[in-house]
């Protein structure tokens, strides 16, 4: 069956959180010492843990962690509590400032082939949905990079009350695009969460969440594997 729709994960698939891309920021430890840019990258890695719970998350927030992508307030509270652990030794204002920086569209870098794939799919008449477990609106990030016009639907967990791998969120995305699951391809960096699209009949292609400049054409290869000449 011809491909009529593509569902795309956001973080690690279309964009990657790379804080060095945004304007310079200064942070300090609880002792007033400056935090190196390398340490900031490490802290952001703690904030984007793909599975499990962060090592420094208070035990009373473990249940909240598993529903963080459904509620913006819960998401912020869990991340700030984790980063505020005395074990990390950050100044009191740093967890909130790091969280705000994560929301900044300029902190997110598109993979080298993201624009080409989104534009190419639009030109080919193939509908596109961004399907993400996330607690904030991604439209400003796509707009900041000139890509919003190439996305037909944003299906975001906090807005829908559903998270991947729940089959219902894939069904919803296909319905929004007006395509049957058998006519859709899901591309994402998680075999567990994104690969669950196969349960409703979608095809699936896995990409690796590598640093952007080391992954030049994975998205292009994923859509080409399903007969789309880009």
Image (cartoon, grey):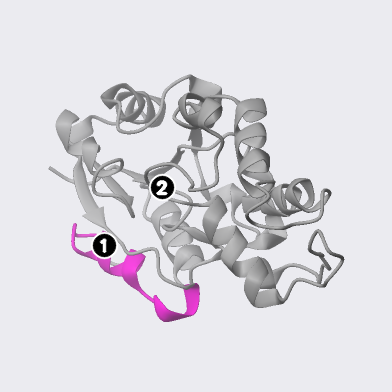
Query: Considering the numbered disc 2 on the image, is that residue within a helix, a strand or a loop?
Result: loop
Q: How many marks?
A: 2
* Residue 31 or residue 152, whichever sits in front: 31
* Residue 227 or residue 72, whichever sits in front: 72
Residue 218: x percent and y percent? 32, 69
Specify whether residue 216 is painted magenta.
yes
For the point 33% across and 64% down, which residue is it? Answer: 208
Left or right for 174, reference 97: left
For the point 65% across and 59% down, which residue is it? Answer: 146
Residue denoted by label 2:
9
* Residue 179 or residue 27, whichever sits in front: 27
Specify whether residue 217 is painted magenta.
yes
For the point 68% across and 71% down, which residue is it? Answer: 21
Asked whether residue 63 is in view, the answer is yes
Compared to residue 121, the image places residue 23 above or below, namely below
Residue 61: x percent and y percent? 54, 28
Left or right for 71, reference 157: right
Residue denoted by label 1:
222
Task: Give the magenta part as a residue range.
Answer: 212-228
The answer to which image quadrant residue 106 occupies is bottom right
Query: Considering the numbered disc 1 on the image, is that residue within a helix, a strand or a loop?
Result: helix
Please rate how many residues cluster around mark 2, counting C-alpha atoms within 10 Å: few if below 14, some from 14 to 19, many from 20. many
In the rendered image, the quadrant that contains the N terminus is: top left
Compared to residue 92, the image places residue 168 above or below, namely above
Residue that lies at the very extreme toward the left in this rendered image: 1
Asked whether residue 18 is in view, the answer is no
């Amino acid at each position: 069956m011809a491909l009529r729709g593509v569902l795309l994960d956001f973080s690690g698939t279309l964009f990657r959180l790379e804080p060095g891309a945004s304007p310079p920021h200064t942070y300090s430890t609880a002792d007033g010492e400056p935090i190196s840019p390398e340490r900031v990258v490490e802290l952001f890695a703690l904030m984007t843990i793909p599975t499990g719970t962060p090592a420094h998350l208070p035990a009373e927030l473990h249940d909240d962690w598993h529903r963080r992508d459904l509620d913006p307030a819960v998401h912020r509270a869990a991340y700030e509590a984790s980063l505020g652990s005395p074990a990390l030794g950050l100044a009191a204002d740093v967890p909130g400032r790091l969280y705000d920086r994560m929301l900044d569209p300029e902190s997110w870098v598109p993979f080298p082939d993201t624009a080409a794939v989104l534009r190419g799919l639009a030109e080919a008449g193939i509908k596109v949905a961004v399907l993400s477990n996330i607690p904030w609106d991604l439209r400003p990030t796509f707009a900041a990079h000139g890509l919003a016009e190439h996305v037909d639907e944003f299906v975001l967990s906090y807005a829908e009350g559903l998270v991947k791998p729940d089959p219902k969120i894939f069904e919803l995305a296909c319905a929004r695009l007006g395509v049957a699951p058998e006519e859709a391809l899901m591309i994402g960096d998680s075999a567990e969460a994104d690969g669950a699209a196969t349960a409703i009949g979608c095809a699936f292609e896995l990409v690796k969440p590598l640093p952007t400049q080391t992954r030049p054409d994975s998205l292009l290869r994923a859509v080409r594997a399903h007969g789309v000449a880009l």
